[in-house]
Amino acid sequence: MTRPAHTGQDTPRDLDAYLAFRELVERAAPRRQLGLLDVKRAVLAVRDGLALEAAADPYSAQLTFRLAVSPGTAQLRVVQVGRMDQGDGLDASQLVEGFASPELSAPVQLELEGVASTRRAVTHWSAKSRSRMFRTVPTLDFSEWTDGTLGMVTLTLPGWWEIVTPTGARLKYLLERLRLRFRHAGIAWVGLWKLEFQRRGAPHVHALMRFPALVGGVAFEDWLSRTWADVVLDSLSERDAFAYIDMGEYDRHVAAGTGIDYSGTRFSDPRRIATYFLGHSAKTTDGKEYQHVVPAIWRAQDAGPGRFWGYWGLRPGVVELDVPKEDYVQLRRVLRHVHRARAARHAEQAARYGLAIRRHPLRSLGASGGGLSGGTVVVNDGVQLARDLARFLELRRPWVIPSGVGPDGRRVLARLH
């Protein structure tokens, strides 16, 4: 069908002022992000500081102690020998001069929670999926994600949303059509996304993406509004499409179907990104939990929402390293102190500014759960934390004075050490 002309009375955009605004946004947001290569180098430094041999221990002989580092996390875990390991990271023994072999560099897509089951209806976003989101997002490699301006894109549906998207699969189909429009326009379809619902029940998607200032000489915001409205219009039958246009739904969707929130420094590191998404996903007392409740029309069998969150074009940047039990115990103590220090600082800020204390759904590194239980610490800079751990292990190693050094040399070396 012929594409309708937008009849809204929008004020023409001043492109010069718009480009100046985008330049200011670019300067405010840092572009350098930690990546897999940074993690590899930091883990190699940790490996150099490990004990050469592990003490004989019949109990630990059946266990493998493992440290996993990513751009925003440090994790300790115990793997039982002989069991299938479900880890998704790179093993440090497979690194050669800081680089992984080609077959290990292929993108990895995690299986996420929230998939609709044919046995029971999905009525809300599960706590397990929220926990996995907070654990997964800080592990992603954002280092190559540099083209364009970083911002939060919001895609909403029109008043006819029950006709346009009667099932969750239909919404994912519309997103796939939008991805093809992005590719045709030369825009990378890379980012994080999260599904929510409005009070009226209509689904909408938040996507953290990078995008250009102009698309074919048109401001990206204007191009996105029209493109998303066209994608929705094309999904209707010809009869419904004419009625959709005649009732003014198309024009209203062009005017209010999209929104962009520029990030500034809120997404400057993995922890801030994960915390921002967690803030949208946490069960709060401000009446916004309805955003995670599935509407009745999507609770029918095979009509569920599918995944509530995910990522496009990104891959985990996790590197794993087997460590001796002695070093594992020491690293566990250090990470426990890091975890408690962050918790104490957050509690102090909450008391000072009257904020609510949110417990992150992660395994604790505390004393409970057994003397060898592991856990995860989410930090702003996982690479720097790994370097600090390497320095800690280096200082713990026994210091041996080389043979042939006289008394004067021994005193000098002692001062240097």
Image (cartoon, rainbow, N blue to C red):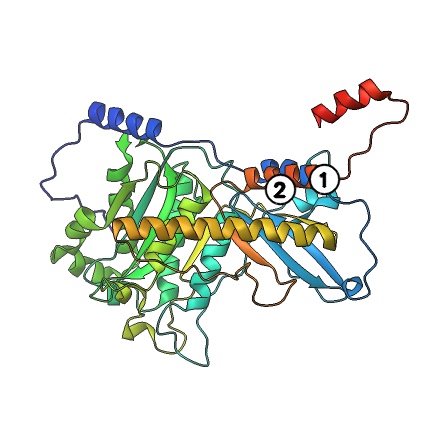
Asked if residue 36 is positioned above or below residue 216 in the image, the reply reads: below
- In the rendered structure, the answer to whether residue 322 lies left or right of residue 403 reads left
> Which residue is the extreme one toward the top?
408
Disc 1: CA contacts within 10 A as few (<14), some (14-19) or many (>=20): some
> What residue appears at the point 71 percent right and 45 percent down from the top-left corner?
92
The three-letter code of the residue at mark 1 reads Gly
> Which residue is the extreme one toward the right?
404
Where residue 49 is drawn, which disc sits there? 1
Q: Locate the C terminus by quadrant.
A: top right
Q: Position of residue 379 (x, y in %)?
A: 48, 46
Asked if the residues shown at circle 1 and circle 2 are in contact, with their CB atoms under 8 angstroms apart, the answer is yes
Q: Position of residue 403 (x, y in %)?
A: 89, 26
Observer-nearest residue: 249 or 18?
18
Where residue 389 is drawn, which disc sits there? 2
Disc 2: CA contacts within 10 A as few (<14), some (14-19) or many (>=20): many
Q: Position of residue 104 (x, y in %)?
A: 68, 46
Circle 2 sits in a helix, a strand or a loop, which is it?
Answer: helix
- In the rendered structure, the answer to whether residue 47 lies left or right of residue 173 reads right
> What residue appears at the point 48 percent right and 35 percent down from the top-left corner?
33
Asked if residue 389 is positioned above or below residue 401 in the image, the reply reads: below
Q: Position of residue 358 (x, y in %)?
A: 36, 59
> What residue appears at the point 43 percent right and 59 percent down from the top-left corner?
360
Circle 1 sits in a helix, a strand or a loop, which is it?
Answer: loop
The three-letter code of the residue at mark 2 reads Leu
